[in-house]
Amino acid sequence: MRGLELAYWLILASLACGCRQSGHAEKPGVISRSMPSSEQAAEVEKEIKAWFAGPQESNTYGTWRRRGDSLRALVPVLLKSSDNNVVHEALLMARDEFSVPEVVPDVIRALEELLTTPADPEAGTRMVACDVLGKARNPKAIAVLLQALEDPYLQIVRTPVPGDHGVEMSWNAVWRDADAALRRITGANPVEPPGGRNPGDRDKTRKAWLAWWEREGKTKYGGGEK
């Protein structure tokens, strides 16, 4: 495990250098980090926690979203919450409502923590984090997404086919979302993507991406000569 961790940090250091040299320096964002009111963030966090602790009725879900665009400035604060449900909701807002590229560093940090703690047993938050990073297409996320390829979580979903025609099977996996995000960011295709009926081969996909990194990713995104 120590070898994998060392490889991750080496990739992270290369990306930090490469993003500066390649013009991917972080731009001033729309979000002002001094703007979010701690009281507002605490109020939203309280609402989210209360919903998940209650009967979770669909007609009461998302009452915190009625604040509209004012939530945009609170997303970075909510991503730092120690409550997984709050982090999950903040990621959904970043992905589906606001499309805020400014929160990429916060999402990277959140995913790093989720990959090393048992706070997300059903993996939904890790999968949404991969989606957010893929949508942002920021090369700074490559290192943590390569790390996410090691995530062993796999969920088999069986959906009954109408007319008593058996069941249709599909698979959810963190590594598959990390693979999709890496493809969106880099445009690379180092291995044939798994189909909807096939869970794919996690180890084969991870090795293909690490080989891609050594072959061309490090040069393009890690500060090497082009």
Image: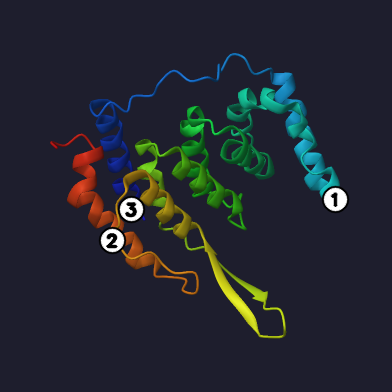
Give SS at disc 1. Answer: loop
- Amino acid type, label 2: Ala
- Amino acid type, label 1: Glu
| Mark 1 residue crowding within 10 angstroms, few (<14) / some (14–19) / many (20+) | few
Residue at screen point 57% across, 40% down: 95
Q: Which mark is residue 208?
A: 2
Q: Earlier in the sequence, mark 3 or mark 1?
A: 3
Give SS at disc 3. Answer: helix
Q: Are marks 3 and 2 in contact (CB under 8 Å)?
A: no
Give the foreground label among 3 and 2.
2
In the image, residue 224 lies at what x, y percent?
Answer: 16, 37
Q: Mark 3 sits on what residue?
A: 4
Give the foreground label among 3 and 1.
1
Give SS at disc 2. Answer: helix
Q: Mark 1 sits on what residue?
A: 57
Q: Give the image quarter of residue 19.
A: top left
